[in-house]
Amino acid sequence: MSEFSQHLLQWYSSNKRDLPWRKTTDPYHIVVSEFMLQQTQVSRVIEKYHEFLTQFPTIHSLAAASSADVIKAWSGLGYNRRALLLHRFAQEVVTQYNGIIPRSAVELRLLPGVGAYMAGSIASFAFNLSEPAVDVNVRRIFSRYFTGKDQGAPLGKREEERLFLLVKDHIPQNRSADFHNALMDFASVVCTRDAPKCSSCSMRSFCVFASFYETEKEKVLYVMEKKKEKGVYENGKFVPNRIFRGRIVEFARKNESCRISLAVFGKTIKSDFSISEKEWLIMLCDALQKDHLLTFTVDGVFIILQLFQ
């Protein structure tokens, strides 16, 4: 076991978070948690995890469900497209693998909603295989510790390949799940993006970044530029379209098949909505329909929404 891995796992043994998906070895349950955790706070996922699994206790039950039921069950998690990808993942596993989630990262990459990180995380957390799961947190920790650079955004192809191999070299035998969980917790508690706790870090004496962070933090701390999102102003504040999309899907969950005036619908989605924004509102609904999240019809000044079946 490398020095880095040894110190990281020692820290983890005393600081691990108590999370429900870490108490199971059921691959399906772990897959559900991984889809939920994408771009969503852990606290919110904890609230929905057991509820979702109560409704869909097996991958077969999820695969057999309607898209509408899955979208309804996803309420509160945001990024609703993930619900459909998880649904399609379940259907593909049932159809192609008789309901048995494949262990190979290569096979996992062929399934809906699974990229390089997701394939590694499922292989690691569900099967304890030594497959790197490199996300922004892992990239940040390894870049800081081994090079002194603070890198959060994806690197070039060759650099990413080197990082992948570096992570793989440090995964302790038969402890891939613990190792990756330790990285997630360490990134969340100590090696944070904006204010790393280098002065109190148990690994600081071995870390290249920590050696000069306290004196040169303004020079070495990397701040990732936020992507410019499309959106509009609501009550003087810019709001991304993805927020309004989420509100529309939530509205459809509660008012499915109801005939609602566009004025009332618009005010529900955007508090200062004016009828001049009708084209923008319909554009959002059309995009959601193309994503197979809902269907809608406009009848004069009325709209009818229905979750995709």
Image (spheres, rainbow, N blue to C red):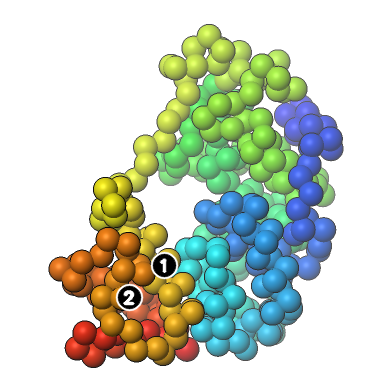
Q: Left or right of 108: which side holds 152? A: left
Residue 130 horizontal/vertical position (percent): 72, 50
User: Considering the numbered disc 1 on the image, is that residue within a helix, a strand or a loop?
Assistant: helix
The quadrant in which residue 288 appears is bottom left
Q: Residues within 10 Å of mark 2 (few under 14, many from 20)?
A: some
Q: Viewer-proximal residue, 141 or 190?
A: 190
Residue for point 78% across, 42% down? 16
Q: Left or right of 180: which side holds 232? A: left
The quadrant in which residue 20 appears is bottom right
Q: Viewer-proximal residue, 232 or 80?
A: 232
Residue 275 visible at all: yes
Q: Earlier in the sequence, mark 1 or mark 2?
A: 1
Q: Viewer-proximal residue, 132 or 209?
A: 209
User: Which amino acid type is marked by label 2?
Assistant: Phe
User: Which amino acid type is marked by label 1?
Assistant: Arg
Disc 2 marks which residue? 265
Q: Left or right of 241: which side holds 104? A: right
Q: Viewer-proximal residue, 252 or 150?
A: 252
Q: Residues within 10 Å of mark 1 (few under 14, many from 20)?
A: some
Residue for point 66% across, 30% down? 190
Q: Quadrant of the N terminus?
A: top right
Residue 206 horizontal/vertical position (percent): 69, 19
User: Considering the numbered disc 2 on the image, is that residue within a helix, a strand or a loop?
Assistant: helix
Q: Contact, CB < 8 Å: mark 1 with mark 2?
A: no
Residue 283 visible at all: no
Using the numbered discs, state the Cα–Cα distance from disc 1 to disc 2 in whole angstroms: 10 Å
Residue 146 horizontal/vertical position (percent): 60, 25
Residue 79 horizontal/vertical position (percent): 47, 63
Disc 1 marks which residue? 247
